[in-house]
């Protein structure tokens, strides 16, 4: 590879690395937040109670808001009282934002390592 091409490649790789650093900083803003997190997802659950004379046997299911999460490989459910619904929904949404940011940080780090290896290869000289 010619020296000029090599310098252009290095320049492109460095620019890509800077972009990843900017993306990393953006992703870490969520991680640096101070909002409490609650693992899980809030949703409305509809179910039958099992009483033969109940209206739910006719299709009018019982509805309640629940928080669902996984713990030791098992799905857990917590019935949410109406006064805590907004709070738990917000905290679970923040947890999901945190997990997405964490996944993106991991992805960025892998991409950065690939770029660093390519930069090293282009900069390395024979002894």
Image (cartoon, grey):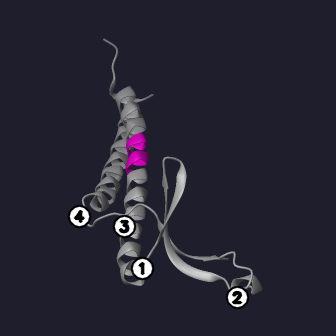
Q: Which residue is mark 3?
A: 94
The quadrant of the image that shows the N terminus is top left
Q: Earlier in the sequence, mark 3 or mark 2?
A: 2
Between marks 4 and 1, how big is the CA–CA gap?
25 Å
Q: Which residue is mark 2?
A: 55
Element class at badge 4: loop
Q: Nearer the viewer, mark 2 or mark 4?
A: 2
Q: In the image, what residue occupies the spot 69% across and 85% down? A: 54
Report, in whole angstroms, how far the alpha carbon at label 3 lies from the one at label 4. Answer: 10 Å
Labels 3 and 4: the sequence-earlier one: 4
- Residue where numbered disc 4 is placed: 34
Res 36 quadrant in image: bottom left
Task: Measure how far apart labels 3 and 1 are at the Cα level.
Answer: 20 Å
On the image, the x and y values in percent for residue 86 come to 38, 80
Q: Position of residue 62 (x, y in %)?
A: 61, 82
Identify which residue is drawn at 40% across, 46% down.
106
């Amino acid at each position: 590879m010619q020296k000029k091409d090599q310098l252009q490649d290095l320049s492109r790789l460095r620019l890509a690395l800077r972009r990843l650093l900017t993306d990393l900083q953006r992703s870490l803003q969520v991680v640096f937040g101070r909002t409490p997190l609650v693992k899980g997802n809030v949703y409305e659950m509809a179910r039958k109670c099992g009483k033969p004379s109940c209206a739910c046997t006719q299709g009018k299911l019982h509805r309640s808001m629940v928080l669902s999460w996984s713990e030791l490989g098992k799905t857990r459910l917590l019935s949410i009282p109406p006064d805590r619904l907004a709070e738990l929904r917000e905290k679970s949404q923040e947890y999901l934002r945190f997990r997405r940011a964490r996944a993106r940080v991991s992805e960025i780090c892998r991409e950065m390592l690939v770029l660093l290896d390519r930069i090293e290869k282009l900069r390395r000289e024979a002894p």
